[in-house]
Amino acid sequence: MNRIKRRLATKEWQLHLMIAPGVVFLILFSYLPLYGILIAFKEFLPSKGIWASPWVGLKYFDFMMKLPDVWRVTNNTIYIAGLKILLGFPVPIGIALMLNEVRRSFFKKGVQTIIYLPHFLSWVILAGLILDVFSLTGIVNSFLGWFGIEPFYYLGDNRSFPWIIIATDIWKNFGWGTVIYLAALTGIDPALYESSVIDGANRWKQTLHITIPGIVPIIILTAILSLGNVLNAGFEQIFNLYNPLVMDRGDILDTYVYRVAFQETNWSLSTMVGLIKSVVNSVLIIAGYWLAYRITKYRVF
Amino acid sequence: MSKLHDTWGTRLFGVINYLLLAGAAFLCILPLINVLAVSLSSSHAANANLVGLWPVDFTIQSYKVILSRPEVLKAFWISTERTLLGVLLNNVLTILMAYPLAKSAKQFTGRHVYMWGMIFVMLFNGGLVPTYIIVHDLGLLNSMWALVLPGAVPIFSVILMMNFLKQLPSEIEEAAFMDGASYFTSLSRIIVPLSMPVIATVTLFHFVGHWNDWFSGLLYMTDISKYPLQTMLQSVVKGNDIMTLDAAKLYADVSDRTLKGAQVFVTALPILVLYPFLQKYFTKGIVLGSVKG
Amino acid sequence: MKKKALRFTLFGCMALSLALTAACGSSNGNNTGETANKTNDAAAGSQAPAENATAEKPEEKPAEEINPYKFKEPVDVVFAKNVFDIKVYPEGEDPGNNAVYKMIEQTTNIRPTNKFAVPYENYRERIKLGIASNDLPDIFFAEQADVDQLIKNDMLEDLKPIYDNYATDKTKQISGYKDGLLFTGAQRGGKYYGMPNVSDALNGSPVVYIRKDWMDKLGAQMPKTFEELIALAKRFAKEDPDGNGKPDTYGLSMNNQLDLKFTALMNAYGAYPKVYVKDADGKLNYGSLNPNMKQGLTMLADLYKEGVIDKEFVTKDMPKSMELVSQGKVGILIGEFFSPLWPLQDVPKNVKGADFVSMPMPGLGGAEYQPNVPINVSGYFVVRKGFAHPEALMLLLNNLAETSYSNLDNEWAKAWSELNKNPKYANASINNWLPVFNDRPDANTNRYNLFTEALKSGTDQNMPADQRVTFQNVLKGKEGDAANWAWYKTFLEGVPNASSYKTIVYNGWFGSATETGKLKGASLLDLENQTFIKIIVGKSPVESFDDFAKRYNDLGGKQILDEMNAQLANQK
């Protein structure tokens, strides 16, 4: 073993060489543009450029905090995005596990292909369909009508609107989400199943003791990264579906800032909003990383 | 996996499983059928929202509008070229970055610096304008490189692949190292063949990312004749507000809805073709089965 | 509420372009054009070195030497080109290299190139990006918001002196329409930071379209007053005019953007929501707070309750709300003069026998109806600060004005006419190829006059060739050709109705948001939209309007108004 280690130590430069091209690209296209963050603290005058524009300190942070509805929309954002993550996260895992149990390859591939299709429909197109499906005379109300339930204006009601947003988002993306887990499932050693069969484990037990633990690292990874979406409740989706009756619960940070920016194009404000979101995301992701490490002793980064 | 152990309960579970999956697939395909039907309907029927799952007054006018233009074919070619180049670059960089990062800090000094340096720019970015200025200053505007270089490192893919690589038992490389193999040899001869499922996954992500991206075309191409397909189609499909005579006239000719529907199918087709091809890599046990076998 | 209004006027009038197909071309004309182009290329090449030396000259020249149509020496100008439709360029030509650009060079000595040539949606992005990276074309079109940004950053040339020196009377007739009203958005003190991109003055003027076949079925008369119009809407909703035995018809079309379909109704009550109206003292007031709004809202709430407007209009933006109209389920549409082209021409296709009659909005109790119409500017042509030849813009506008008023003595107008006769370009909507385009504010009213004249005299030989194809469409429509029904309705009914109003109320504020407006404008607008919608759907009583008006002012509305009035007072 030590011989290998020593031999490898002399080859370590190879690893640095491998990573170098990527690092160059990151420096060029990710690190260099970072100076743009300064715009958040400056009165950006394009004719002077970013460097020479005058500093205004936290003016745009104050501006944002003073916006009349900023807390209401932040609340809504966290509520909708939080539930999207919480409820949407397990679905692709469940579907992947279910697909894993299917033996007919034709059926399996067919289902896989079909469920990832909605991911490719834009919210502009889907919004029109969702309005129809949930309209007073739409499929949902007609269906519930068979059970004597009165038609309900789901998209014009503050209580139901966020749930429609959450449900349709999960529906649109769960199929696409399964791709990662299906790949993860391929990494499980088949020998484990074989030996468990000899031990008399049924398929439920196999799933519980072999399959799930086998994909746990990937689950942790996606869970941690999804924490970074707590302030992204889905601009495109809500922008195309919301209306004055559901502003109390359906209006989110991004749509609100869009309307504020509508009064005037404001690079400083949008950069500030982006920066705040980045900070919050970082805190959550790092907390998630740390927590996952404490519990599972597994480092995803 | 032997059938001997299939109990009554297992079989019931199997049936329910099939039913649930079929139901999910059903829910996912209905809207798509509707969009397809709309794209093949007359504009007045589509404008009136009279189309369900079957076209009304069947016509392929929208597809003609989209496909009859030589510049659309050119854009299709630009997109193809960009996607192939972009996926190749993304994949190579993903593999080259994920492999060293999957090593421990003992084996790879500075691993944590690289890793967190990458995470940092995943979380923070300088925004549109500085990136644009850099691409502009590098003289990349209007070139294929503007479409592939700024996003050359797909950070998420690197992290994903790194996590996959970490799962591989370290023994599989040891024999090679004993024989004096370099990291490069080990990566190309052992690791890459074992990582086909994850490579297939990130390939899919990269392919879809490049093929569907219309924004960087808008940002970095100042000439419509250099647009990739998605950016081009974005411009064929018109805006929503009918404010003037000219706009009303345009809207009357071809419905925005049928065009949008047609656009979905024209652009999604390559992705639909690609997916089943990649699916063969998602076969259970391929990774370790092949090592031990 | 949702999407920023897209204005397509900038790059040409479709009807006009189509009309150009009429111009018959001859191979002779074609040859002349090519020869001319070649000559011109050679000339441009030889004169290029002289350009720098003369760069500063035109401005210094005394007024009597000014040629408002042509530079003496070639001048390079970088434009931004909105590509309306790339497929119309023939083989070998593109947005940066085509017959129109050659013609411009030939007739004005302006050598046009494009900084970028992209479709309009992308054009807007590029302008914003250009502002942010301080990398702008010499002459370009900018929307109001971008104009504000550009002025704030001191990135534009003042065009007032050039306008005074160079603008011809015809240009002043177009750009100076309504005593310089159109300049307002780009005016700061005495300075003009842009030339208005003038659109048809009839855009946004309300026209009422009523289902003729339904009226006949119910034996109803054309309404003479606003009250009768509303009563007719109720009958359409309740008396099953489509005869299918189901209560599935609606009186009026409405949507959640609270656009013309809403404001035109409120205007009948003397309330002007969404705009700032000047009172007797010349002070601005916000129209949405006018107490008369209550009458309008009460009326709409009643219509909603009775099912005269769609119960689900709150979730529908304008295009979505048009579905019901296209289905032929709506009896009355408050639209614009071009509404027959979209969406109304779908109706006869979907419902056999459907037909529409149109009329101007009637007044309350038969009184005069005074609509609010947005001023006919879709944005401004601006010149980058530091560009040596800002007068190039005036030269182009002067020449365009000659074309608009069909003066064939002008070199440009003549060349333009020739180009239109060339079969290679006759069908190509070459208006859209121009880097800068303006038409008369009365372009469609003018068409209406020409058409009625021709109908009376029985010949279209007196009208300019470029109008004839439109006229032929109108004529066919008049004679009952279903395919041209919409042309006939648009030009012979829509246009005269839209232009029939004697008094028009204009928005008194054109500038960008004030300091308080930037901070609170979005929330105030939300409050306003929510209040109106909630009253209409019966979630709030109409009395809540008073509370809204008070809250609106308390939350910053009053302050915004004060800031605007102060700013206006300063400008005087």
Image (spheres, coloured by chain):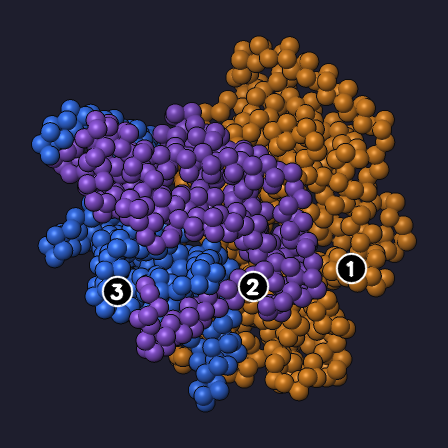
Chain colours: A blue, B purple, C orange
Which label belongs to residue A231?
Answer: none
| Vertical position of residue C485 compared to residue B80: above or below | below
Q: Where residue C141 sits: x, y (%)?
A: 53, 38
Amino acid under disc 1: Ala
Q: Which mark is residue B33?
A: 2
Task: Provide the secondary structure element on which disc 1 rests.
Answer: helix
Give residue A77's quadrant in the image. Answer: bottom left
The relative height of residue C16 versus residue C266 in the rendered view (above or below) is above
Disc 3 marks which residue? A197
C-alpha distance separating marks 3 and 1: 73 Å
Q: Which chain carries label 3?
A: A
**Quadrant of the image occupied by residue A97:** bottom left
Q: Are discs 3 and 1 less than 8 Å apart at CB? A: no
Foreground of the two, C190 or C267: C267
Q: Are marks 3 and 1 on the same chain?
A: no
Image point (47%, 36%), residue name? B84
Circle 2 or circle 1, nearest the eye: 2
Q: Residue at x 19, y 36 (%)?
A: B174
Does residue A93 sit above or below C382 in this rendering?
below
User: Mark 1 highlights which residue?
Assistant: C483
Q: Distance between the residues labelled 2 and 1?
A: 31 Å
